[in-house]
Amino acid sequence: QTKIPTRATYRSTGSGTGQREFIGNITHPANDFGASDYPLSSENYNQLRNAGQEVVHLPVVMAAYSVFHSVPMNAAEEPGQLPTNLNLTSCLIARIYQGDIVSWDHPDIREVNPNLELPLQLDFYGKPAEDQSFPIKVAARGDGSGTTVIFTSYLHKTCPEHWGEDLVNSRPNWPLANSDNFIAADGTSDLLSVITDNP
């Protein structure tokens, strides 16, 4: 409660932008408060404190994060039977984001998904295509994102042989960034649209 009327404005910008604006030029932050999926780095925190700024971190929530897909798997043939689930280990996900695995019919994906049935791909004449590989399109946040820090930290901690510490960042240099099968999206809603629109 305040004695003087106070107006607060909240903008959903992503954690990277939010933290940059909160830090400002150290002596004059652009914002007075912000929310982020990850705390300020020790370096930024100490710079602000050394410049006379009071900084308070308030943990307010714990959340779960997921990897979404839109793999067009065949629906169940029997009434009441659920479609096949997609199983991926952290190392498979890391290898997909590295560009090491580029198709859903890769043997290592099939090994943990023995019942995976991908749609039959047809050629121009409506006949089964000679190449039945199903290319993987990878989507990720292109802006600074707290979710990306959590995701890349998870890949590094669970599969360091395929995801180096240099790729743990709110805005990493995605290995597939220059590939035709990589799509960067700004903001969560755009990312969900990309997944939905690109099976």
Image (cartoon, helix red, strand yellow):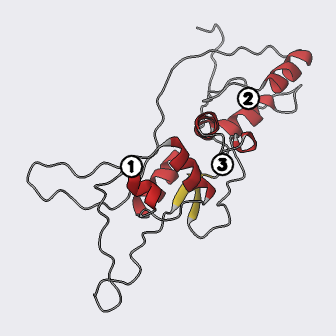
Give the spatial CA distance, label 1 vs label 2: 47 Å
Disc 1 on helix, strand or loop?
A: helix
Q: Which mark is residue 143?
A: 3
Image quarter of the C terminus: bottom left
Residue annotated with mark 2? 31
Dot 1 or dot 2: first in sequence order is 2
Question: Looking at the picture, which amino acid does disc 1 mark?
Answer: Val
At x 73% / y 39%, what residue is drawn?
165
Mark 3 and mark 1 residues within 8 Å of each other at the beta carbon: no
Question: Looking at the picture, which amino acid does disc 2 mark?
Answer: Asn
Of all residues, the one furthest to the left in this rendering is: 79
Q: Which mark is residue 112?
A: 1
At x 30% / y 83%, what residue is drawn?
128
**Quadrant position of residue 3:** top right
Mark 3 residue crowding within 10 angstroms, few (<14) / some (14–19) / many (20+): some
At x 41% / y 80%, what residue is drawn?
131
Q: Which mark is residue 80?
A: none
Give the spatial CA distance, label 3 vs label 1: 32 Å
Image quarter of the N terminus: top right
Q: Is residue 178 above or below residue 97?
A: below
Dot 3 or dot 1: first in sequence order is 1
Question: x, y (%) of residue 144?
Answer: 67, 43
Question: x, y (%) of residue 13?
Answer: 62, 41
Q: Is residue 175 left or right of residue 131?
A: right
Question: Looking at the picture, which amino acid does disc 3 mark?
Answer: Asp
